[in-house]
Image: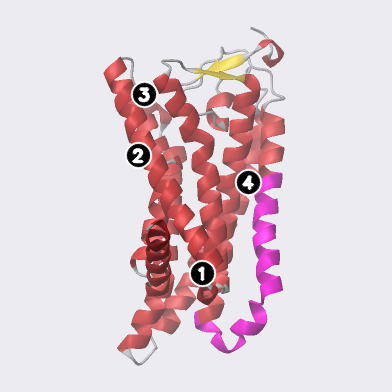
């Protein structure tokens, strides 16, 4: 196989070889997927229907939930179907689509988390100017910029990756298609252009990460100067969920991509991939609802309303 034009599909890495373990994998992924659908769906519905939550913070949270739903829906259903039907196959076009959509949602999510850090910075460090700076039009523009940046990033990397000749077989050492694993199948030296693009993207992501860190350094500096304990508690409640989501996102992704490949067996690679691609979309709604009284009240009203309508 000398060129990727001869490829009709790829073989993904399976979680198990026996029927019992495949059924266990299907059940676990189904539970996580349903939890992600329920949690993010409730947040989207609550924010959309409760006018008290029509603020910049919850507008960005709604966008985050949409991106979480998109990212987990890109990888998990295909993996569940493969386990259920005892297959590892994915078509060439399906693999390309999976790479594009996963990279799109993940990139847009990190850009959106950067915007959310800016929102928290303005709310705490410049509260008197918050209404002027974070107007509805500005929020829509920032959210649209995050989505558009993710789209362009995914389009550029997907097009470039699948234009590279592949001559190392068609077995992807991951349970979903991702660029680093596909580059391992490329011919010697043909992936240097994509590595250059990845380096540029990493620099952009590093810039976003530094912006988030600097923002929170200034936020905590201001919060610690608040004289009342109640004021400090309220400020921390506004920031800690976002900070926890960023920490989970960054730590799992860094561990997945920066760990030495020679020291990580396939089983560990699978576990790490699940941690950064599957767990955050399911856990993020829980993180945001635990310390947010307004969101908990809105979710409580929504659930009570649905139960009342069913009766």
> Which residue corresponds to the image point at 72% horizontal and 32% vertical from the top-left?
159
Q: Which mark is residue 31?
A: 2
> Mark 1 or mark 2, which is nearer to you?
2
> Which residue corresponds to the image point at 40% horizontal and 69% vertical from the top-left?
301
How would you classify the magenta stretch by its main secondary structure? helix
The CA distance from mark 3 to mark 4 is 30 Å
Span colored in magenta: 124-152
Query: Position of 200 compared to 76: left or right?
Result: right
Residue 4, image x and y in percent? 67, 15
Query: Position of 46 compared to 16: left or right?
Result: right
> Which residue corresponds to the image point at 68% horizontal and 18% vertical from the top-left?
165
Q: Nearer the viewer, residue 243 or 59?
A: 59
The CA distance from mark 1 to mark 4 is 20 Å
The residue labelled by disc 3 is: 15
> Mark 3 or mark 4, which is nearer to you?
3
> Mark 1 or mark 3, which is nearer to you?
3
First of labels 2, 3 by sequence position = 3
The residue labelled by disc 4 is: 201
Q: The residue tagged with tag 4: helix, strand or loop?
A: helix
Residue 148 sits inside the magenta stretch: yes
């Amino acid at each position: 196989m000398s060129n990727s034009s001869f490829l009709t599909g790829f073989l993904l890495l399976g979680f198990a070889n026996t029927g019992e373990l495949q059924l266990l994998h299907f059940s676990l992924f189904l539970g996580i997927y349903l939890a992600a659908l329920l949690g993010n769906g409730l947040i989207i519905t609550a924010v959309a229907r409760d006018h008290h939550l029509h603020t910049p913070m919850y507008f960005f949270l709604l966008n985050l939930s949409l991106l979480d739903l998109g990212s987990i829906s890109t990888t998990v259903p295909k993996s569940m179907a493969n386990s259920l039907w005892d297959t590892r196959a994915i078509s060439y076009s399906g693999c390309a689509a999976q790479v594009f959509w996963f990279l799109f949602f993940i990139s847009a999510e990190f850009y959106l988390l950067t915007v959310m850090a800016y929102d928290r910075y303005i709310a705490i460090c410049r509260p008197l100017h918050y209404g002027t700076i974070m107007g509805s039009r500005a929020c829509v523009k920032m959210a649209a910029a995050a989505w558009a940046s993710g789209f362009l990033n995914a389009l550029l990397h997907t097009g470039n990756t699948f234009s590279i000749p592949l001559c190392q077989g068609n077995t992807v050492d991951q349970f979903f298609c991702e660029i680093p694993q596909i580059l391992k199948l490329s011919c010697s030296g043909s992936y240097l252009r994509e590595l250059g693009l990845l380096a540029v993207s990493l620099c952009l992501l590093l810039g976003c990460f530094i912006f988030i860190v600097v923002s929170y350094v200034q936020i905590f500096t201001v919060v610690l100067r608040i004289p009342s304990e109640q004021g400090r508690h309220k400020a921390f409640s506004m920031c800690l969920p976002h900070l926890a989501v960023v920490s989970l996102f960054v730590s799992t992704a860094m561990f997945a991509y920066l760990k030495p490949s020679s020291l990580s067996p396939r089983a560990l690679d699978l576990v790490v991939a699940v941690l950064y691609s599957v767990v955050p979309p399911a856990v993020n709604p829980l993180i945001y609802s635990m310390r947010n009284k307004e969101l908990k009240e809105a979710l409580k009203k929504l659930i009570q309303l649905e139960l009342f309508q069913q009766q």
